[in-house]
Structure formats: structure tokens, C-alpha cells
């Protein structure tokens, strides 16, 4: 709701999923994790990430770094999913790899934008 008020409804995209986990129990008994990405603008800058379920605290901590660095849906789509985890759902949200026509990274230096992969600055 805050993103809609700040950026306007026409500028918001929402991607969501419900993850049932790999446990070998009846689907009614499986713990479920609900997640949502909220993106703004034609570059689909990720402005919100919501998760409820097992491991939510750790997912929010990790993905919080990406949001502070200006991640876009394209950045999420370009990540390798760690399987089987609930966190993989954030980097494979439908439509995976088919976001806006402006599929660019929010990072300042990114191979997605045609740059070379970043290299560390060495002391000596």
C-alpha cells in the first residue's frame, strides 16, 4: 500500500508465490511460506519484499542487502536459485526473466548492464 501511495498504482508490479517445501508429508500438513516482491518503475526496482513462514527472518536479512543496493527484478532473476529452499522462490518468481523490456541491474557495476564482472581492489 505504501508503494502505491508513493509511486502510483500504474508504476507498481507485484510478484507473489506460496512455497510448500520439500517435506514428504501430505500437502495439507506441509509448512507454507508466502512471499511477495513489490517493484516500481519500468526498471522494476524492488521497493518491497514480504515473507511469512519458516526462515522468514533469515531471508529478510539477506535480501535486505540487495534492496539497499538498488536491486531490480532482473537482478533477482539473474541469481542462481539454491534448491530446495524457500528463498529460491524470490529469484524464480513468475514471470522469471520476462519482466519489463528494460531488464537492467540496479547495481552500479553489473554484467547485466554490459559491464565486466567486478574485481576486488588489491592492496599490494
Image (spheres, helix red, strand yellow):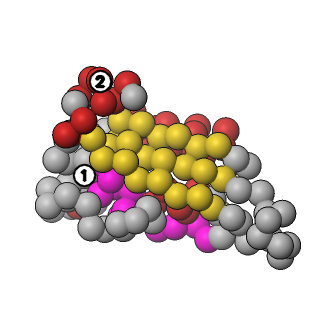
Mark toward the viewer: 1 or 2: 2
Residue stretch rendered in magenta on the structure: 72-83
Asked if residue 101 shows in the view, the reply is yes
The answer to whether 3 appears left or right of 23 in the picture is: left
Residue 123, image x and y in percent? Answer: 37, 41
Q: Secondary structure at mark 1?
A: loop
The answer to whether 30 appears left or right of 112 in the picture is: right
Is residue 79 magenta-colored? Answer: yes
Please name the residue shown 71% across and 66% down the image.
Answer: 21
Q: Which residue is more in the foreground, 79 or 38?
A: 38
Residue 81, image x and y in percent? Answer: 52, 67
Quarter placement of the N terminus:
top left
Return the residue at label 2. Answer: 5
Which numbered dot is residue 45? none
Q: How many angstroms separate mark 1 from mark 2 (CA)?
A: 25 Å
Quadrant of the image occupied by residue 11: top left
Return the residue at label 1. Answer: 105
Q: Can you say whether 2 is above or below 102 in the image? A: above
Q: Are marks 1 and 2 in contact (CB under 8 Å)?
A: no
Please name the residue shown 43% across and 47% down the image.
Answer: 37
Q: Can you say whether 97 is above or below 15 in the image? A: below
Please name the residue shown 52% across and 58% down the image.
Answer: 17
Residue 36, image x and y in percent? Answer: 48, 47
Amino acid at each position: 500500500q505504501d508503494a502505491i501511495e508513493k509511486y502510483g498504482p500504474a508504476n507498481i508490479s507485484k510478484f507473489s508465490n506460496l512455497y510448500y517445501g520439500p517435506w514428504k508429508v501430505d500437502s495439507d500438513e506441509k509448512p507454507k511460506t508466502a512471499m511477495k516482491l513489490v517493484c516500481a518503475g519500468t526498471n522494476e526496482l524492488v521497493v518491497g519484499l514480504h515473507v511469512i513462514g519458516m526462515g522468514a527472518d533469515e531471508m529478510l536479512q539477506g535480501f535486505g542487502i540487495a534492496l539497499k543496493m538498488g536491486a531490480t527484478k532482473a537482478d533477482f532473476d539473474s541469481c542462481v536459485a539454491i534448491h530446495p529452499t524457500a528463498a529460491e522462490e524470490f529469484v524464480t518468481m513468475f514471470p522469471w526473466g520476462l519482466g519489463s523490456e528494460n531488464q537492467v541491474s540496479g547495481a552500479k557495476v553489473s554484467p547485466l548492464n554490459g559491464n565486466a564482472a567486478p574485481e576486488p581492489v588489491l592492496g599490494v
